[in-house]
Image: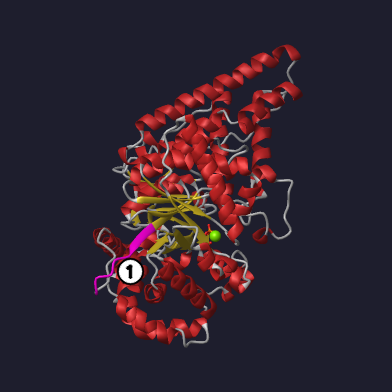
Amino acid sequence: MTDTCFKEIRLTGINASPGICIGKAYLFDIEGVDVVKKYFISEDDVQNEIKRFKIAVNKAKGQLLTIINNAPEGLRDHSYILETHKVLLKDKMLYGRTIEIIKNEKVNAEWALKKVVSEVKSMFKKMSDSYLKERATDIVYVSDHIMRNLVGAETKKIADIDKRVILVANDLSPAEASQIHLELIKGFVTDRGGKASHTSIIARTLEIPAVMGLGNVTNIIKNDDLIIIDGTVGTVIVYPTEETLLEYEERSTKYEELKAAITRGSHLRAETVDGFQIKIMGNIELPEEVVSVINYGGDGIGLYRTEFQYLSRPGLPNEYELFDKYKDVIEVIAPKPVTIRTLDINGDKAFNNNSDYVEVNPALGLRAIRYCLKNPDIFKTQLRAILRAAAFGNVRILIPMISSYEEVIETKKILNEVADSLSKEGTLFNRDVELGIMIEVPSAAIIADILSEEVDFFSLGTNDLIQYSLAIDRGNRDVAHLYHSLHPAIIRMIKQVAGVARDKGIKLFMCGEMASDPINLPVLLGLGIDELSMNPQSIPAVKSMIRALKVEDAKAFMKDVLKQNTASEVEELIKATYGSILFEKVYARRKAFGDRA
Ligand code: PEP
Ligand code: MG
C-alpha cells in the first residue's frame, strides 16, 4: 500500500541498467573512512609500517577472492572486473607510491594511502573521457578495502541481506554489486556513479534495473519506503500514488513481454523480404561486452576498440596481457569473426603516458596509425598479440585513420616482419587473417580505388568521416546540430567507396554510429554495404527493420535520395517512404525501452 501522508516524489538520475522494479527500499550505507589521522613515525618504525600496509593489502586480496568465489553464476564471466581490482591492489600507482610516501615522508600508512588516492583522483579528474574517470573510481574502491583493513572498520555485506528489496546506497563498488543475489535484490539506486562504471556493467549483466548518479537519494529515501525504479529512462519514484503504481505495474509487464519478444527476434537472421542477407555485428570496447553482443543476437564483433587497455593504466600493457584479452573475446564468440582494430590512441583518447605532451589540434594530430607507425615497438607488441590470439578463432585486423597509400604499405611491412619473427621463434600464431582499413578520413574515401588493391576490406568509420568531412568536432555540443549522417556529402562519399568495393571485389562494412540508427537503413541497404556493426543494444531493432525491407526497393530508392539537397530533405523522404515500417519496428519499441532499443 502507498503511504498517503507523503507526496509522490520523482527523481532523475543516470539510466545505468534498463528495466522496471517496484519494492521496499533498503538503505545500504557503507560509510567511507573519511577521517584519517596523520602521524609521523621514526626511521626505525618505517619497515613495520610498510609491513602493516602490506598485511592490509593481503587481507583485501583475500576479501576480494571470497567475493569472487561466492559471486552468482551469471557474474562468473565478469569476475575479471574483480580480478582487475586484485591486480590494482599491487598497482605501482597505488601500492608502490604508498610505500614510497611511508618511506620518504615517515608518515603512517593510512595517511600515505589517503594522499595517494587524492593524487590519483586529481590526475584522472583532468581527463575528459568518462570511461577513464570511472577507472579512477576503481582505484578508490580498491584503496577503500585497504583503508578499512588498516583502521579495522566493520564491513557490511550485501550478501547478508535476507529480504526482497531495492538497494539504496551512496555508492556501490563492483565488489559490492557482485554480491547481489537476484532472488533478493530487485534493483538499486545510488547517489554516485555513472554509465561507464563497472558497477553499471554488472547491473546490465545481471539484468536488474539501476539508476545511478542521483546526487542525494540516500537523504530522501528511508528504509522500507515503497519505491519504483525505471532504469530505462533513469527515473526513481518515491511514495508513488495508487495510480502511479498501477501504471508502472502495467509498464513493467509490458517491458518484460517486449524484452522476451526482442530476445526471440534478435536471434533470427537479418534477411530482407527479398532474401538478401546482411551481417549485423557488435562494437565492443571492453572484453566483457562480448556477452552483450551474443545476447543481442550479433553475428560477430565488427569493431573491437582496443585503446581502452592502454588508457586505464600508468604503463603500457605487455604482449601477454593483450594476448589474453584478445584470446578471451575470440574464443567466446568463435567461430564468428572478431575485427580487432589496432590502437586508435590520441585524438579524443589521449595517452596517459604522454601527459606532458599536449597537441594543439589532437583530432588532426598524432592519432591512431600515425602514432603506431611512429612508435613501431608499441605497434609490433599489439600485432604480435593479435596474430597469436588469431590462432584461437576467426580474426580480422582493422587499421584506423588511414589517410594515404604509404601508411597501408608501411603497416603491411610491419605486419609481415611481426609474422616472420613469430614464425622464426616457433610461436603458435595465425598469419592468415584478413586485413582491412577504416575509411574515416576523406582522403581515404577519395583514393579508395588505390587502397583497395592492398587490403581485404574497408570499414566505414562514419563518426570520424562525418567529423572530418563536414568539419564538425564530434565532441563539441555547439556544432552538434550540424552533425548529420544523412548529409548529401556523406551519402555521396559512401556511394563512391561502395562503387570501388563492388568493382574491386572487396567487402564493405560500416562500424560508425550511422549503422545503428534504423532510419539510415534504407540508404545503407541501397548503397550495398555488406555488414553493419553497432553498439550491442541496437542490434535487435536494426535486425527487425532489415527484415521488413526489400533490397531492390532500397536500390531504386537511392535515385530519389541522391536528388535531395539537404540532410533534412533526405530524412523527410525516408520518413515519407518508410514511415510506417519505422514506426512499427522502431519507434513503438523505443517508447517502451528508451533510446537505444
Ligand atoms: C568511427 O570513427 O566511426 C569509429 C567507429 O571509430 P571511433 O568512434 O572509435 O573513432
Ligand atoms: Mg574513428
Which amino acid, by three-letter code, is at mark 1?
A: Arg
- For residue 545, what is the image quadrant? bottom left
Q: SS class of the residue under badge 1?
A: helix
**Residue 523: in sight, yes or no?**
yes
Q: Give, as a single range, the part of the protein colored magenta.
A: 274-281
Q: Is residue 278 magenta?
A: yes
Most foreground residue, 62 or 183: 62
* Secondary structure mostly seen in the magenta stretch: loop
**Residue 195: in sight, yes or no?**
no
Is the CB of the residue bearing disc 1 within 8 angstroms of ligand 1?
Answer: no
Residue that numbered label 1 is attached to: 589
Q: Is residue 595 above or below residue 78?
A: below
- For residue 9, what is the image quadrant? bottom left
Residue 537, x across and y down, in percent: 38, 59
Most foreground residue, 411 or 334: 411
Most foreground residue, 393 or 41: 393
Most foreground residue, 275 or 165: 275
Q: Is residue 130 magenta?
A: no
Left or right of 68? Residue 547 is: left
Q: Residue visible at 64% across and 42% down?
A: 121
- Residue furthest to the top in view is 44
Judge the density around disc 1: few (<14), some (14-19), many (≥20) Cα neighbours within 10 Å.
Answer: some
Judging from the image, the colouring scheme is secondary structure
Residue 565, x across and y down, in percent: 52, 87
- For residue 499, what is the image quadrant? bottom left
Left or right of 322? Residue 589 is: left
Q: Residue visible at 40% across and 65% down?
A: 505
Q: Residue visible at 58% across and 24% down?
A: 150
Q: Is residue 562 above or below residue 152?
A: below
